Image: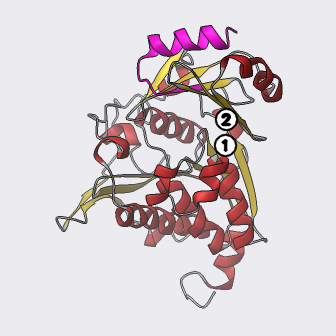
Amino acid sequence: MRFAPIGPEGQAKLAASAVCIVGMGALGTVLANHLVRAGVGLVRIVDRDFVERSNLQRQMLYDEEDAAQGLPKAIAAQRKLQRINSDVRIDAIVADVTARHISRLLDGIDLVLDGTDNFETRFLLNDACFREGIPFVYGGAVSSQGMSALLVPGETPCLRCFIQTADSGGQTCDTIGVIAPVVDIVASYQAVEAMKVLIGAHSARRNTLVTFDVWSNRHFEMKLGEPSADCPCCGLKQYPALQEQEAEGAVSLCGRSTVQITGRKALQLSEWQERLKPAAVKTELNPYLLRVELPEGERLVLFPDGRVLVQGTDDPVRAKTLYARYIGV
């Protein structure tokens, strides 16, 4: 409140605001930390994954105990964030973000922040935000490089206007690495723009896509310009990511040696632990997921919503074979 551009009036606006952070990995944990400490009234956090030891180098809200327990990232983050600021409501959702339920996730939300690690999900968020008229703060970080932009329906181009393809070229944090400082910088850019939007500081908003490399000391800003008339999202209002049928079967998670299979039925984890024990090398159950070590060397991770991660392979055919062998639903 002592910072004049925000002041008591701006602080009250933050307290009355609701944001959604999709992805609680490196970017998401920094974003949530900043916005919860800033006093945003409702912070909804959404993530499909769970904490692993390799995350700790860059995902600031987690610790070794979270990884040992195999906690879902949204739950582990919620526990930390509630101890940071008890005045903020933390709405933690353990789920895969799909076209089927994206509208429910954004219900009542004033602004969406990108904490994801893939362009398929980013395009889904982009299309949903531009259809619903919700500002979207894009951010990405890999290696020592970062980029960020504030995208506002009716005022700026959308993400599709300057990034046409969802192909990352194989450059992910899991394939070429990332240093933690670049993550903090990107998420801080995002958080500041979010605060400007939430308090109505329109003249202070940045109207560029900023890109930088903190290792080679390069920095570049590109004017966003006008929305493209032939853009399928903000120009033609077709919102292609929302029209696509939800992928059936197995989807390889880039750089993770993991295949996700979206099941059609909910899973009672305690029942499945008993079913799989005789065939498994080891099982570990917590309230949020069941981990099963298989004699073949791979691992299954079962979630109550029916999703199953097959870890130890990036071959969808192999994953489907194991899924059919052990789950069969």
Q: Which residues are magenta?
A: 309-329
Q: Residue at x 72, y 49 (%)?
A: 92
Q: Is residue 20 left or right of residue 177?
A: right
Task: Inspect this view and state whether residue 146 appears.
Answer: yes
Q: Residue at x 62, y 85 (%)?
A: 7
In the rendering, at what x and y percent does residue 54 appear?
A: 46, 50
Q: Which residue is mark 2?
A: 103
In the rendering, at what x and y percent does residue 201 appear?
A: 53, 71
Q: Distance from label 1 to label 2 (Cα)?
A: 5 Å
Looking at the rendered structure, the kind of residue marked 1 is: Leu
Pick the front one: 315 or 142: 315
Task: Inspect this view and state whether residue 19 appears.
Answer: no
Q: Would you say residue 322 sits in the magenta stretch?
A: yes
SS label for mark 2 = helix
Q: Which residue is mark 1?
A: 106
Looking at the rendered structure, the kind of residue marked 2 is: Ser
Pick the front one: 317 or 89: 317
In the rendering, at what x and y percent does residue 100 appear?
A: 65, 25
Looking at the image, residue 4 lies above or below residue 28 = below
In contact (CB < 8 Å): disc 1 and disc 2:
yes
Q: Residue at x 58, y 44 (%)?
A: 133
SS label for mark 1 = loop
Q: Would you say residue 293 sits in the magenta stretch?
A: no
Instruction: Determine the image quadrant of residue 208.
Output: bottom left
